[in-house]
Amino acid sequence: MAYYLKYRPKKISELDLESAKLSLTEILQAKEIPHAFLFYGPKGTGKTSSARILAKVVNCLKLKNGEPCNKCDNCKIIESNRSMDIIEIDAASNRGIDDIRELREKIKLSPSSLKYKIYIIDEVHMLTNEAFNALLKTLEEPPKHAKFVLCTTEVKKLPGTILSRCFSINFTKANQTEIKKALNRVVKGEGLKIQGEDLLKIAKASDGSFRDGVKLLEQLATNGKNISSKRVSEVMERGLGGDNLDEWLVWVYQGQISKALSWFQEAIKEGLDIGRFAVLIVERLRDVLLIRMKVETEASDIEGLDNLESLKKLTFRMLQAAREVKGAVIESLPLELAIMEWQKEELVIPAKESKPVIKNDKVKLGQILEKWTQILEAVRPHNHSLEALLKATKPAAFDGKYLSLEVFYKFHKERLEVDRYKQMVEEVIGKVMDQPVIIKYYLGEKQVKDDIIKNAEEVFGVEVN
């Protein structure tokens, strides 16, 4: 059994997050316990463990001072995951109204063996609006034999109507002392030998997550119970931040895909925590974005990530991949695809020495018209929607710097003037014509062919008037 499951807290007093422990102790010792709880906060902070403890508290046959005995039949069946009255639902996979309707029908039935049915809904923010409305009706008129624990990492996505029906507890990121306490419990239980300063290093690398810290300790223990400082340093340096992460990000950004993938695969073989690594990528890119936006931060910059628009796009692509890692059949695949797709991304900047030299000869409008088909083809790999929009324009004038493009529909003009699209067109034309170009769009007469209009309507799913 994985360490984080084997050593998860079994009583309120064993919870390592002090703020959550105090809140739960207070409410569970009250005369009336709420029928619905909301546990919110970052992953790995003890939300699900606390929900299981709550289930034992309200069902324990020998409750003492608000704590479950962990010895009675009810506690044992809950602890062993054998109770049919403890229902855990992953809202990410069961997010529709039909799933909640099924829950509402089954909740009417009395518990099979326990006093209370406990519904633990994880990632509850993933429910659809219709599902939230259906859940709200149950929370407003719950049967006496049922209690709910809603867990989420994104509380801002929950409707206010749901929030108002729940007793909320904020599971904040754990501090290093709290994580070290949790790690010590594992060290003692497994008979591991590790220096206190090395445990602190693990706690720092865990970014407030008990689960990540324990998983990292388990990774370190795969080579034996004696964990040396050298071993800890090696693992810390292998993808858990620092200069090597920055270097890897530069490889990805500059399109050195083979190099980036090779490093990634080697790190996986060495035991890289892919989920944690995905989060670190996004956090590091965010740090650099804040620096570029001149926001005060203690983070350091990364030399080589020199274009703000490209940096935004890379951050967004990695954010998407990080979200997909958790539910992926092959955990590494979302990141691998993101790395490979980035090679085709819109604004990957070449190395400084390969930038085109600006010539003094001014390109004429006729030359642009001659190469217009080539320009459209060059745009296609970057963004086929943008190519469709450009087909509905006409180069009208060029003074050596500003290229005027006539657009025939207001909707098209608004889309083309989006900063990222405008910059992309300018870069593509500049590359094809070997000269910097600034685009100006203006609304002309409606002379666009029907097939072009149809193309744009299909791309954007709207009717062009």
Image (cartoon, rainbow, N blue to C red):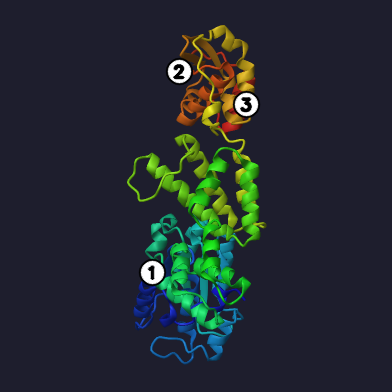
Q: Earlier in the sequence, mark 1 or mark 3?
A: 1
Classify the position of the N terminus by image quarter.
bottom right
Q: Is 287 above or below relative to 360? A: below
The structure residue drawn at horizontal position 59% and vertical position 19%, both measured from the top left corner, is: 432
Distance, label 1 to label 2, CA atoms, is: 53 Å
Residue closest to the eye, 327 or 226 = 226
- Tell me the SS state at disc 3: helix
Q: Which residue is mark 1?
A: 169
- As shown in the figure, which amino acid type bears the numbered disc 2? Lys
Real-space CA distance between mark 2 and mark 3, rounded to the nearest whole angstrom? 23 Å
Q: Are marks 1 and 2 in contact (CB under 8 Å)?
A: no
Mark 1 or mark 2: name the one nearer the start of the chain. Answer: 1
Q: Which mark is residue 455?
A: 3
Q: Estimate the x, y position of residue 16 in percent, counting from the top left.
A: 42, 75
Q: Which quadrant of the structure image shows residue 227?
A: bottom right
Depth check: 429 or 32 in front?
429
**Position of residue 238 measured from the top left corner of the image (x, y, whole percent):** 56, 57
7 with respect to 169 (left or right):
right
Can residue 105 be seen from the camera position used here? no
